[in-house]
Amino acid sequence: MGLGKAAAQQHIQLLNKGWQFAEQGSSQWRPASVPGTVHTDLMKQQVIPDPYYRSNEKTVQWVADKNWVYKTQFTSSAAQRNQQHTDLVFDGLDTYADVYLNGQLLLQANNMFRQWRIPVKHLLKANNELRIVFHSAKKQVAAFAKADSPLVIPAENPRVYARKAQYHFGWDWGPTFVTAGIWKNVYLDSYNQPAAEKPFHNPRKIELVQEPDSIGKSFYFKIDGKPVYMKGANYIPSDMFLPRLTKNDYRQILLAAKNANMNMLRIWGGGVYETEDFYDLCDSLDIYVWQDFMFAGGMVPLDEAFFLNVKEEVIQQVKRLRHHKSIIVWCGNNEVEEAWHNWGWQTQFNLHGQDSAKVWHAYKRLFKDSIPAWLQQYDGTRPYVSTSPMHGWGRAASITEGDSHYWGIWWGMQEIEMFEKKTGRFVSEYGMMAMPNMNTTASVTLPQDRYLYSEALKTHQKHPTGFQNMNGYLHQYFIDSARIKHLSLEQYTYLTQCLQYYAFKNSIAIHRSKYPVNMGTLLWQLNDCWPVASWAITDFSRQPKAAWYAVKEAYRDDVLPQRDAVRPKALQLSKPSYTLQWKNAETLLLKSSVPAKYVYLHVPGVNLQLSDNYFDLQPSDTKAISIKGLPVSQRKVLRIWSLYDVVKEK
């Protein structure tokens, strides 16, 4: 039978409707959303408050300790039952899920990144019940770790046992919400013959050139024979509760990258393999994708079952994603090899001799031997690097070969100018933290929370020394540290964002000045997964922070960015007075009486769309700014700040 005819007889029945959920052992059933997560279902039913609000993160932790049951009823038609095959398909189950159809156990799922397909024709009736028991991932990983004891698989908690988005267990920019749920579509697929696999052809010729040279080894991408300098960012998941994200959310986030003149995003290994919408948008926007496999900052369990589970995941994901022309490199993991060699794990976790050798062997087998072989078999058109970065930032070789995550600035508290000496061949992570936009902070706090180091603010700061580091850099570059405690939260937010603007502008200027020795700069990070103080240049509201405007300018193709001659702290500032003239409904002409630094236009509570912000203004210039989202009636509440207003002596 020809494929056309067979495909025409395929019948898909979505099963996303009519779901209910309950805590295991309870008879209190409530309506559930599919795709969804237990946290968002509980929130919709007002069982828990918004987990992002104030310090609610702490009060909803109990959710992750429970098992949850989901159920629905559905009918199947005689026509459907007459097809030769009917499969029950789950595009995503998060994560440990026992699936029952009409009382019969069909599946024990254990990988959030896999599609599960089970033949069910023999079990289908006219009326059917589908029931899924989700086991607490938090308790499951703890049990796996206990079974391996005294051997410890290095990571900051047993999260590495779960094939689940690792950031759910907490990160230094994210909360801890260990989710569960049917996070993608569920459907019946009825057919007489399985559809043939689509032939795969990559229209691009992609090379990653790593050749010895006078400095060390090059590291750059050639696309269709042309070397391309990569300007971009790291991308993390855009929410803790992934099914909430829409195509429109992805469009907004990816346009923020495109409009900042980026040509590459690195999909970081502690999140998820992204949606079709995400990669379709990257394809159409001409954004290259560096695709990590989903491993980050932890070694891998040693058992064969784990290895085979990952093998199935890798094959499925490569087959799903390989037709996206945007993907130009596969990478085994984020920072695992760097950690093994540099983070002192052997001492911390008492791994010596044979234990150490076993853990390293499991790593090597997966990332250096197996994944490249699977890629060769199922793709074969793209380069593979086994880990990112090649060397830790404290090692001399990290500057001369491979890609580099340079955290001497921020973690090491080195001055930003250190990049003059420490720019690697391809800088795939570096960054500076800033507060989220004030409107974003306001959306998850009460007025009484809006002061420095309040409990709610500390909940939305996940780096162990985040405030301390920001304050150290503010002292070096902007304002004496003794004065920081006197700042309002709004002033502090503004200054940290000016600091981040300065850091990214000057880091990128230095990186680009090192071309062609340096062939890429990917800042950490593009986006946030919740409202938080972070290295992101757009926050959870999807609005740009100050640094976004700096990056947009620094990543231009037509001009190379120039470094600032002096630090803002050394500037002689005078009080500006401004002349405003509205040229038309959306264009403001702005003049300043004196040189003004980091001129910031804003309306409290309103997210404006501005063509530029946090800019410098000379008295000889008239700046035309396009402003969308500001009704004429609100023009009088438009506020204009500059650096003088915040750092001048009271």
Image (cartoon, rainbow, N blue to C red):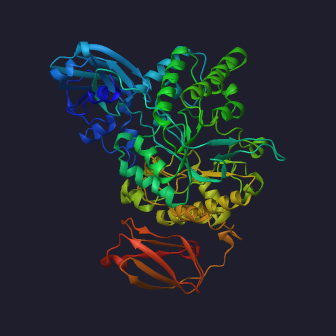
Q: Residue furthest front?
A: 2
At 73% from the left edge and 55% from the top edge, which residue is drawn?
Answer: 419
Asked if residue 539 shows in the view, the reply is no
Q: Quadrant of the N terminus?
A: top left
Q: Residue furthest right?
A: 214
Q: Is residue 217 left or right of residue 540?
A: right
Q: Position of residue 214 (x, y in %)?
A: 84, 47
The image shows residue 254, relative to residue 595, as above or below, that is above
Q: Position of residue 258 (x, y in %)?
A: 50, 57
Q: What is the quadrant of residue 197 in the picture? A: top left
The image shows residue 465, relative to residue 617, as above or below, that is above
Q: Is residue 147 left or right of residue 251?
A: right
Q: Position of residue 277 (x, y in %)?
A: 40, 44
Question: Which residue occupies the foreground of this view, 299 or 48?
Answer: 299
Q: Quadrant of the C terminus?
A: bottom right
The image shows residue 598, relative to residue 340, as above or below, that is below
At 61% from the left edge and 17% from the top edge, which residue is drawn?
Answer: 151
Question: Which residue occupies the foreground of this view, 55 or 133?
Answer: 133
Q: Position of residue 164 (x, y in %)?
A: 46, 30
